[in-house]
Image (cartoon, grey):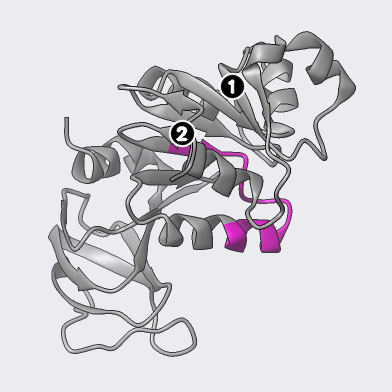
Amino acid sequence: MSMEIVQSTRGVTLLGGGESLAEDVAESLTIAPVLVAADSGADRALALGRMPDAVIGDFDSLSEHARRTIAPDRLHPIAEQDSTDFGKCLMHVRAPFYLALGFTGMRLDHTLATLSCVARHDHRRVIVLSDQDIAFLAPPEIALDLPVGERISLFPFGSASGRSDGLKWPIDGLCFSPAGIIGTSNEVTGRVMLSLTGPVMLMLPKIHLRTALCALAPQ
């Protein structure tokens, strides 16, 4: 059992050291007000005038400025190298849901590692934000009210199948896999209803963050 560094009854914003827009961080904190930085995400938080409630990671990229500025009891170094800093946050923070920023963009391997980590921690409700989109692991059953014509992508992180309503290209009868059939750039035709078996990442334009959150972690 992993030691819990942060326990929250409210949503947690996880901030990494990659690309993140100031306005996205600000909005995320109105939804998930507890701020946990992953390693150099602490430097990004300080640059935005935010003091993280906790900093978790192996601290290989945390600046000396951040180490001096942030109170020692908020710094939680974890030396093991079997997980990413993002993974360390998911293992050691308990919350109803997580909004993750600064974990995509700059390096493709980091982005893939982030999405893989979300798929692996399927007991957590995590939404990853990029500059344009959001991504989250779909539960076995999900309903989404989205505008007709909107883009929605389904990307498998293993063998998967399912049924759908409200998609221009239904997924019924398809067998998904990362190196086989995938479901990117589908289109909404009505209320989206998905029944899924296997790990499938859903990707939507970022403007639908609150819609996705309501479907993923209803209050």
Q: In which quarter of the image is the N terminus?
A: top left
Q: Does the magenta stretch include residue 187?
A: no
| Viewer-nearest residue: 177 or 22 | 177
Instruction: Tell me residue 26's x, y (percent).
Output: 51, 20
* Residues tagged 1 and 2 counted as in contact (Cβ below 8 A): yes
**Callout 1, which amino acid?**
Ala
The residue pinned by badge 2 equals: 93
The vertical placement of 200 against 132, above or below, is below
* Label 2: which secondary element: strand
**Callout 2, which amino acid?**
Val
Res. 153 in view:
no
Q: Quadrant of residue 150?
A: bottom left
Res. 176 in view:
yes
Q: Taking 7 as reference, is 179 left or right? A: right
The vertical placement of 53 against 96, above or below, is above
- Magenta range: 99-113
Q: Taking 174 as reference, is 106 left or right? A: right
| Viewer-nearest residue: 79 or 74 | 79
Taking the spot 40% from the left edge, 78% from the top edge, the residue there is: 158
The vertical placement of 94 against 152, above or below, is above
